[in-house]
Image: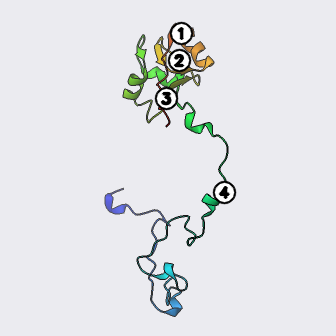
Amino acid sequence: MRLHDLKPRPGAKHRRKRLGQGESSGHGKTSGRGGKGQTARSGSSIRIGFEGGQMPLIRRIPKRGFNNARFATRYIPVNVTALNVFEEGARVDESTLRAAGLVNGRGDGVKVLGDGDLSRKLTVCAHAFSSSARAKIEAKGGTCELVAAKPAAVQG
């Protein structure tokens, strides 16, 4: 296969909709804009949820109750199998996991989960461990060190 043999997959490319090409084209007269009014004009844009000045539905509905999602602790999961990339006797913490590409993104800490098998003795420092992960790490002679959780952002 060469560069000149490459072509898009079937259905990936669409013809441009040619507007205003006469009544029989199906896109003539109003060119797909419907009837008259604000949305038929050029340059018009109405923000999402706008109801013509009427009180929008999202503001009419009462908001009650408490949602714990804002205060939940979100751990970044790492399975025991992934720790096999480190050499025997290594100390594994969040910074070494990030350097190895096993932890990405933002979270309140790292949680080690017990999926798979561990083949090395490691010292693992994390914010949380599942019971099966702790058992597998300690079965190989390694140790599990709990790191204090990051201080939560103050909501005000």
Q: Which mark is residue 118?
A: 2
User: What amino acid does circle 4 point to?
Assistant: Ile
Callout in the foreground (4, 2): 4
Callout in the foreground (4, 3): 4
- The single residue placed furthest to the left in the displayed view is 3
Q: Position of residue 38 (x, y in %)?
A: 50, 80
Q: Position of residue 18 (x, y in %)?
A: 44, 82
* Among the two numbered marks 3 and 1 on one chain, the one whose residue lies closer to the N terminus: 1
User: What amino acid does circle 2 point to?
Assistant: Leu
User: What amino acid does circle 1 point to?
Assistant: Lys
Q: Nearer the viewer, residue 115 or 62?
A: 62
Mark 3 → mark 1, Cα distance in angstroms: 34 Å
Residue at the disc numbered 1: 140
Q: Which mark is residue 152?
A: 3
* Among the two numbered marks 2 and 3 on one chain, the one whose residue lies closer to the N terminus: 2
Q: Is residue 16 above or below residue 107?
A: below
For disc 1, the neighbor class at 10 Å (few under 14, some 14 to 19, many from 20) is few
Element under label 3?
loop
